[in-house]
Amino acid sequence: MANISYVTEEGLKKLQQELDRLTSIERPKISQQIAEARDKGDLSENAEYDAAKEAQGLLELRISKLKETIANTRILDESKIDASLVQILSKVTIKNTKNNATMQYTIVAESEADLKAGKISINTPIAQGLLGKRQGDMVEVTVPAGKIPFEIIEITR
């Protein structure tokens, strides 16, 4: 059974750009390395050839996984996101009620997560704890460091 992943149009473009880069730039580069190593003679004791073949195998695996991910991707329509409760693509402002620290995160698909940009994966403990909650709700999220109490301050699109 395929794993369906939901992304924005921007997220899908990034996946497609990575696939294009791997197939049009990285694949020919590795083929060239294999050809150069093969030209050096005896393949049974040629470490360069073995390394290039292994790199080729890893690249082909990555290409295959990317193709599968793209095939099983569905684009989310951001205009249909309900801002009354937390869901994927919601921008959520939360306050840690222990230390009064306020944070703002956008909940995105795993492939689009970027903590520096404030985008957390829907699969993270914080996102999982916030899903389906409303503004003003108190949530206790279990993270590796323990339980953290949060108050949902604001939900936007």
Image: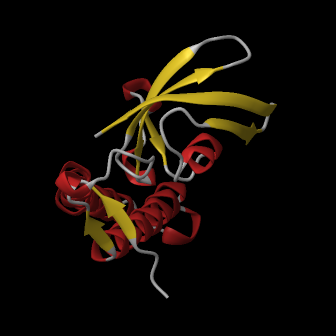
- Give the residue at the far front of this rendering: 136
Q: Is residue 128 left or right of residue 108?
A: right
Depicted 149 relative to depicted 74: above or below: above
Where residue 153 appears, as percent x and y from the top left, is: 48, 26
Where residue 157 appears, as percent x and y from the top left, is: 28, 40
Residue depicted at 45% across the width and 66% down the height:
53
Q: Is residue 56 left or right of residue 23?
A: right
Q: Is residue 25 visible?
A: no
The answer to which quarter of the image holds residue 151 is top right
- Give the residue at the far bottom of this rendering: 1
The answer to which quarter of the image holds residue 22 is bottom left
Depicted 1 relative to depicted 36: above or below: below
Q: Give the colour scheme shown.
A: secondary structure
Depicted 90 relative to depicted 98: above or below: below
- Give the residue at the far right of this rendering: 146
Q: Is residue 35 visible?
A: yes
User: Front-most of 60 and 65?
Assistant: 65
Number of numbered discs on residues: 0
Residue depicted at 56% across the width and 53% down the height:
123
Where residue 95 appears, as percent x and y from the top left, is: 58, 21
Residue depicted at 31% across the width and 70% down the height:
73
Residue depicted at 46% across the width and 76% down the height:
3
Where residue 54 appears, as percent x and y from the top left, is: 50, 64
User: Front-most of 145 and 63?
Assistant: 145
Q: Is residue 11 left or right of residue 138?
A: left
User: Front-most of 34 and 91?
Assistant: 91
Q: Is residue 59 left or right of residue 157?
A: right
